[in-house]
Image (cartoon, grey):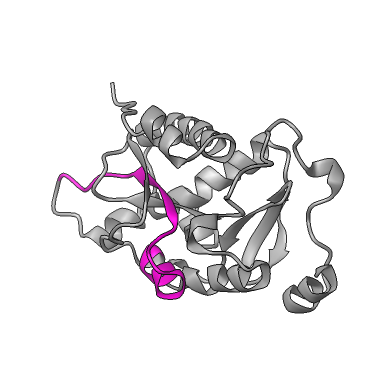
Amino acid sequence: MFEYIQKLFGSKKTSTTKKQISTTLNLSDSPIQLIVGLGNPGSRYHQTRHNAGFMVLDAFAKQHNLRYGKGFKSDETILKDIYLIKPQTYMNLSGQAVKEYAKVFNLQANNILVVHDDLDLPLGRIRLKTGGSAAGQKGVKDTEQYMGSGFHRLKIGIGRPNDDTAIPDWVLGKLNNGEKQLMDEVIAVSIEAIETLLQEDIQKAMSLYNGTDLRS
């Protein structure tokens, strides 16, 4: 399998060694084998609202001392047997990377968690769910094209503009200082929610975190 993955993903060494794999979580019974953070690559999109999925995955990787390498159309790292990927296809084609990992590792939708921004949740809120509508989130919609709608989702609220700012400008706009401080709190809770999902199950994580509201 490893040789096949090398051929598929290229000859570069994977970023993850046994020394980098966290041993602090009990993941032996977790059905989740792929965590996908959605966003757009490049400095232009760094710290933009649409990159909330990237932000959460980066913080999760940092907390578990993981480093990214290059995977299939993605930056990837691994926590024990769970791949964490940030598709580098730009948001609207995120499903291309998800599809390839699903193919290589024979994953079903219920083995996948997608972390993404959500306009209909205010900043300060998160929500875990399984399936449901993409609600205009094009990275989720593209993933549904390949995997169906049954994958798990962690939605990170970014809210809607309270003025006449166009939605594309809003989601691709950078967080201001106050928003960034609140987002940092959201990211910390999101990491806890992911860890609960991995060690327990989606229902337990939903019951603990879907009521979270970090707004003052």
Give left or right: position of 78 versus 216.
right
Q: Residue at x 72, y 44 (%)?
A: 66
Please tell me whether residue 152 is drawn above or below residue 210 in the rendered image: below
Please tell me whether residue 105 is drawn above or below residue 187 in the rendered image: below
- Residues in magenta? 140-162
* Picture coordinates of residue 14, whole percent (x, y): 80, 61
The extreme top residue here reads 216
Give left or right: position of 2 versus 128.
right
Is residue 154 located in the magenta-colored stretch of the structure?
yes
* Picture coordinates of residue 147, whole percent (x, y): 46, 69
Q: Residue at x 44, y 29 (%)?
A: 185
Q: Which residue is nearer to you in this view: 130 or 153?
A: 130
Quadrant of residue 202 within the rendered picture: top left
Q: Residue at x 44, y 34 (%)?
A: 205
Quadrant housing the N terminus: bottom right
* Picture coordinates of residue 26, whole percent (x, y): 68, 34
* Picture coordinates of residue 51, whole percent (x, y): 45, 53
Quadrant of residue 85 within the rendered picture: bottom right
The extreme bottom residue here reads 7
The extreme front residue here reads 29
Q: Residue at x 32, y 55 (%)?
A: 171
Q: Is residue 37 visible?
A: no
Q: Is residue 13 visible?
A: yes
Quadrant housing the C terminus: top left
Is residue 138 located in the magenta-colored stretch of the structure?
no
Q: Which residue is nearer to you in this view: 55 or 60?
A: 60
